[in-house]
Amino acid sequence: MKLSDFDFHLPEALIATRPARPRSAARLLLAEGDGIADRHVADLVGIFRPGDRLVLNNTRVIPARLSGTRRRMTGQGEAVAKIEGTLLEPAPGGEWSALAKPLRKLREGETITFSSALSAEVRAIGDAQMRLAFNLTGPDFDAALAEAGAMPPPPYIAALRAPDAQDRDDYQTVFARHSGAVAAPTASLHFTRDLLDALAARGVEFTEVTLHVGAGTFLPVKVEDVTTHRMHAEWGEVSARAADEINATKAAGGRVIPVGTTALRLIESAAASGRVQPFSGTTDIFIYPGYRFRVTDALMTNFHLPKSTLLMLVSALMGKARIEKIYAHAVDKGYRFFSYGDASLLIPEGRNRA
């Protein structure tokens, strides 16, 4: 299975740099078995059925982009350097791994000041990253970071426009609860409170899980034999209640439908035994064609990058040839791609039964 097997041409004009407004106005490609229909996210009220269970990732994206200064005494006096940092993920001992630009201007033991309240000591420097120990922890850290930081839009958006204050709202789901992600579970960005209420009135049920999406989600696959690729690890939790709800839906013959690949990867990790169990820890599950899904019946997701692990995941769910047709249709019809783009609802053959 070669990396080149998962390539396709994507015109740059189809990369969305802003979300649809309202969120539920985004287009929805509905793929049921061999059929394709062009709909909108708001139409989900008529597409989902009573007894369907949507699994939502309630992680909260932190404002992980930071601007600060490093001060150092030299023979010519105090030298001040501007440092741009991006938090990547928590490290053992309460520290954080982070990117820094320019990293060459930092030394271990130096302090970066991000605001009057927030600073961090550089504990270690690697080839491309640093490890930071902040002066605050817990709620105090969260409050200071919210004040000093900015949202970290994905690199393919940042390459097309500068991040701004609007991203603070646009790049957060309406049900975000638990801080820790540095990237959004983007399929969930399409949901509004009104849409969630309408789905609940329809008889659709919801289960929340938490997977803190890391910056590794944007890392390219660098091996030609995709089966040798190693996934980055991300922390997630499936509570006992969430496991019971999902198992009850399966037992009753209902459909379990993760909203987003993050929710899917987490519940599949928790179902290693064939039945969802409470789970708390890191997962590096890599899903590619040949994978046997244990609990997922369908998936709502955005459109993914060429040669990405997420394109391999949807190919595992729908079949590689089927995904090629779905993506060709999406490009031909002008669907908007990636984090702020349109959505798809992928229902494999045999899973759309009443």
Image (tube, helix red, strand yellow):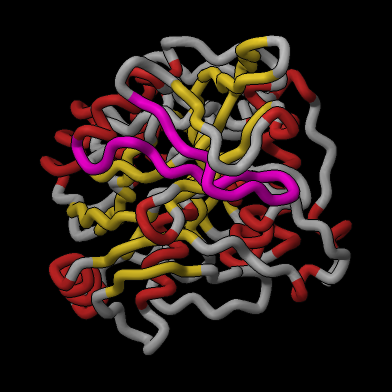
Measured as percent of width and height from the top left, residue 206 is found at: 20, 53
Q: How many marks?
A: 0
Foreground residue, 199 or 135? 135
Q: Is residue 264 above or below residue 12?
A: below
Q: Is residue 329 above or below residue 19?
A: below
Quarter location, residue 101: top right
Instruction: Judge whether residue 38 can be spotted in this image.
Output: no
Foreground residue, 58 or 20? 58
Taking 337 as reference, is 267 left or right? left
Residue found at x 63% / y 23%: 157
Q: Is residue 133 magenta?
A: yes
Residue found at x 37% / y 89%: 273
Q: The N terminus is located in which quarter?
A: bottom right
Return the residue found at the far front: 75
Taking 59 as reference, is 102 left or right? right
Q: Is residue 308 above or below residue 298?
A: above
Measured as percent of width and height from the top left, residue 26 is found at: 46, 25
Measured as percent of width and height from the top left, residue 255 is found at: 31, 65
Residue found at x 70% / y 24%: 14
Taking 22 as reference, is 183 left or right? right
Instruction: State the extent of the magenta-drawn residues as a range.
Output: 118-139
Foreground residue, 349 or 72? 72
Q: Is residue 296 magenta?
A: no
Taking 267 as reference, is 222 left or right? right
Residue found at x 16% / y 72%: 240
